[in-house]
Amino acid sequence: MTAVTPLDSIHKKGLFGNHHEKNESDLIKISEIKNLTIVQVVHYKNSKTQLSNLQIDGLNFPLKSPKVSSNKETRIIWSAPNTWLVISSKENITKFIIEKCDSDNFAVTNISHSRAVIQIKGTKAMNILKKGCPLNFHEFEKDNSAGTVFHGINIIVDFVSNEPNTFNLFTLRSFGESFYHHISDASLEFGYVGV
Amino acid sequence: MLEIKCPYCGNRSQNEFSYGGDATVKRPSLGKEVSDKEWDDFVYFRKNPRGKHSEFWHHVAGCRQWFKVSRNTATHEIFKTSKINEEI
């Protein structure tokens, strides 16, 4: 994919903030996740298709918030009743979803180009999110996701891993740069590495 | 700041929601002859009670679903929330 990524002009690599006299492995790592395929799948209310029989990349659709179905390459996020986001590093996932989710029962929309995706990783990653997000992170576990706000910007938080804490943060592409400023500003206190 | 229990997402902060008005107002039935006063009451007039009140709220930053909240407008205590098609 040769498209310009949403944070192409703003994301910088290197050490920033309060990183002095700290081990680089202890710092927060901020990166832009590129080339993800993001597909919104909506199951029509009147559809008679059973979701329990349906799998995408070997994963079932989670039936309620905040569970995420995941494997190494693909994650299925519950985003609303009968609505999911399938997020995958597989390029052909859209074709696969369209084959499985027929247009009589599902609306399938590729929204890959309309989202900016920031990944924050590190032991202090949760502290960064707590600065601007009202979500109760004490009850937020690995493989959970939630639609919420960060300093007024609508985002989706996806808790990818807890070794160390890793979050993928999705926002609308047009909010990407502003959101990146908020995240990087919140990370200065701990010191961060732009990866 | 209120903590509101979205029927789909669970307890969330008020920041994620948007108030959607009085949930007790009912639109006059379709095809029914409606007087100017009935229509005026439906469009403009609200009770604005001090105490228990049923309201619509929208989970704008979360699941984007509308739902009902029973709330005390004086103390802000939330008694119950329900899906839009359920009685509260």
Image (cartoon, coloured by chain):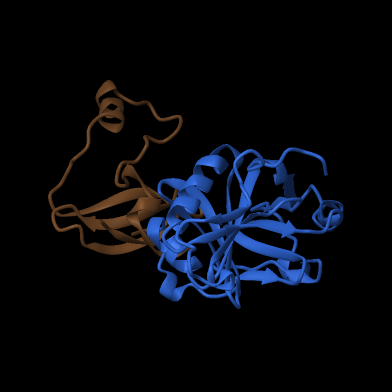
- Residue A82 occupies quadrant: bottom right
| Residue A187 position in % (x across, y down) | 47, 58
Rendered location of residue A175, percent (x, y): 54, 40
The residue drawn where x is 64% and y is 68% is A62
Q: Which residue is at the front of the view, A7 or B65?
A: A7
Could you tell me if residue B8 is visible in this image? no
- Determine the image quadrant of residue A91: bottom right
Say left or right for B57 vs A147.
Answer: left
Q: Can you say which quadrant of the picture contains the N terminus of chain B?
A: bottom left
Asked whether A30 or A103 is in front, the reply is A30
Question: Number of marks in the image?
Answer: 0
Closest to the observer, B76 or A185: A185
Question: Above or below — where is A21 with respect to B4?
Answer: below
Chain A representation colour: blue
Q: Residue at x 45, y 64 (%)?
A: A190
Q: Is residue A184 left or right of residue A102?
A: left
Say if residue A136 shows up in the picture. yes
- Give left or right: position of B75 versus B3: left
Q: Residue at x 39, y 59 (%)?
A: A131
Residue A100 in the image, given as x and y percentages of width and height: 83, 58
- Residue drawn at x 63%, y 56% as measured from the top left: A31
Name the quadrant containing residue A26: bottom right
Name the quarter where the C terminus of chain B is drawn.
bottom left
Residue B83 on image: x %, y %: 43, 58
Residue at the farthest bottom position = A163
Identify the chain drawn in brown. Answer: B
